[in-house]
Image (spheres, rainbow, N blue to C red):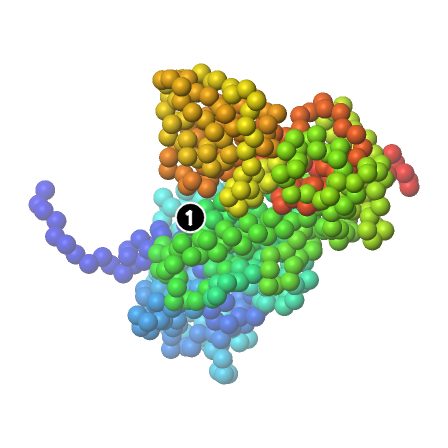
Amino acid sequence: MPPKRIQVLPGQLANQIAAGEVVERPASVVKELLENSLDAGARCIEVDAEQGGIRLVRVRDDGRGIHRDDMIRALQRHATSKIASFDDLMAVASLGFRGEALPSIASVARFSLTSRFEGEERAWRISGSGGEVNGGPEPAAHPFGTTIEVRDLFFNTPARRRFLRTGRTEYQHLEEAVKRIALSRHDVQISLRHQGKAVYSLKPAPDRPGQERRVAALLGQAFMENAVHVDFSTGPLRLRGWIGLPGFARGQADMQYFYVNGRIVRDRLVSHAVRQAYQDVLYQGRHPVYLLYLDTPREDVDVNVHPTKHEVRFREGRTVHDFLFRGLTDALAQVQPGVSAYAAAPPSSPPAAQTGRTTAPYSSQSPMPLAVRDQMAAYTALHPAGKNVPQSTPATPRLEPEAADGQLPPLGYAIAQLHGIYILAQNAAGLVLVDMHAAHERIVYERLKQDREAGNVVSQSLLVPVSVALSPAESALAEEYSPTFAELGFDIARLGPTDWVVRQVPALLQNADPAQLLRDMIADLSTMGASRRVEEQSNAVLATVACHGAVRAHRQLTVPEMNALLRDMEGTERSGQCNHGRPTWVQLSMEELDRLFLRGR
């Protein structure tokens, strides 16, 4: 075979190759056409589809339209009105800018383009098939704006068409594409029809209540009932939107929407920052839900990274990561027991919202300050080193403490203990069930973290030092991480090749088993590896330490002790979940209890 020479590909073949990157399925067509409509300034967009978009996709808008003389040019590769120079590319303000979408779509489908340019008296139409245009523009009847029809997708590329799924599956992807656009622009009216039936018609939502209604319509009412509104900024960066409560996490990462300057992205830096913010409150294998909008100077973001523009590159990636992590961490930390998920802090700071897993929303309550009388001496049994733990002044125990303002506190007051595991409390909404070990574990964990960050971890010398025999591998890790142990309040020393002694432990843990505690901490460090940051390693160890220091199940508590635990929960960050992400309390409203007993029927 003679050697082949380099040659320029025919235009139609080049467009079909580009379509392989830009047009994956009907949903890709809808995404590109919707973005073009938004870039054209459309305020009303209608989407029609048949057979999941395989047979037909029609997008109609009321934007600026396309001039008659530009209609043929719009189907040529790299022809665009959105950028004209390198400086424009470095600060892209539009969703599209490459000029590849229309020619790529037209090369693999039968298409028609009808448009009436703003200020013109007449509309014009062109049509074609497989990238070939059937003559020039023809007069047509059409209001201001543009309508693009795409029929029989991949009719001329059978191999691509065979990769399409059933009409139902393709429709699910198409609906998701419309949903993403609808969530990005609350100010635009968007409607979707499939097989001639209206799926939804979303009116413009300029204010927050309207936006919440749109989000509920697209993501479900349960999302809004279990989400916290956030809005905070630092310098040129601003983050707003909704984050799901930890108890509303899902088994898949299928309800995560993140927009950068109005463009939806799936960025590793963003995902990592969000995961880090949730790391203390999510159960293993669960994924947080969120709908977030990041506003940042356009010149600080490079969107020309991926053919589908789903990935971006930040000029100051570390700054963006820290901004997201700290802001979301603070927002989750400010979540308070008993406050409705709809409640939010002012725009200047992250919000407060309901903690724990609730089965039904109820009227919000303002969190009350910790009642001094609830911090009784009896509770020091749960905190052996209570004198070293910041808390309110002990007072005479009361079975039914009185709130300072005459109202019940968010988690109410204890009425009983069930099998030494759960605390039953009564609040204004109904019945509260508390897992006392999980709740106390979070309290101890947060106090240990605060002590470590403040550099004043209080240690307690053991009356009799405890000898621990480790394996050679465990002994090596104990030697490597001995500075970390010292920082956390432990005093350990090596007696032999594999023999160690524990002389001091954190004061909060003086009743824990030092030998088992040391082994568990070493096991945590061995699974994490040296690549993890010191802070992450310390937090993981503290989580294990807190589990050992928390009150155990089947321990009988007095009513004053139970009330003190409830008050501590109300004053502790992230108290809705234990260190492993499990819920610490559940609310049963009076309405739910009435339904259980068929009351009111």
Q: Residue at x 42, y 50 (%)?
A: 269
User: Measured from the top left, where is residue 221 in percent x and y?
Assistant: 68, 50
The residue most toward the left is 2
Kindly identify the amino acid type of the residue bearing the numbered disc 1.
Arg
Res 213 quadrant in image: bottom right
Decide: is 389 above or below 515.
below
Residue tagged by mark 1? 268
Q: Residue at x 35, y 64 (%)?
A: 98
Q: Residue at x 37, y 60 (%)?
A: 315
Q: Nearer the viewer, residue 177 or 368?
A: 368
User: Measured from the top left, where is residue 195 in percent x and y?
Assistant: 59, 53
Q: Which of the image's four quarters has the N terminus?
A: top left
Relative placement, left or right, of 365 versus 182 is right
The residue most toward the right is 600
Q: Is residue 584 visible?
A: yes
Res 475 quadrant in image: top left
Decide: is 397 above or below 151.
above
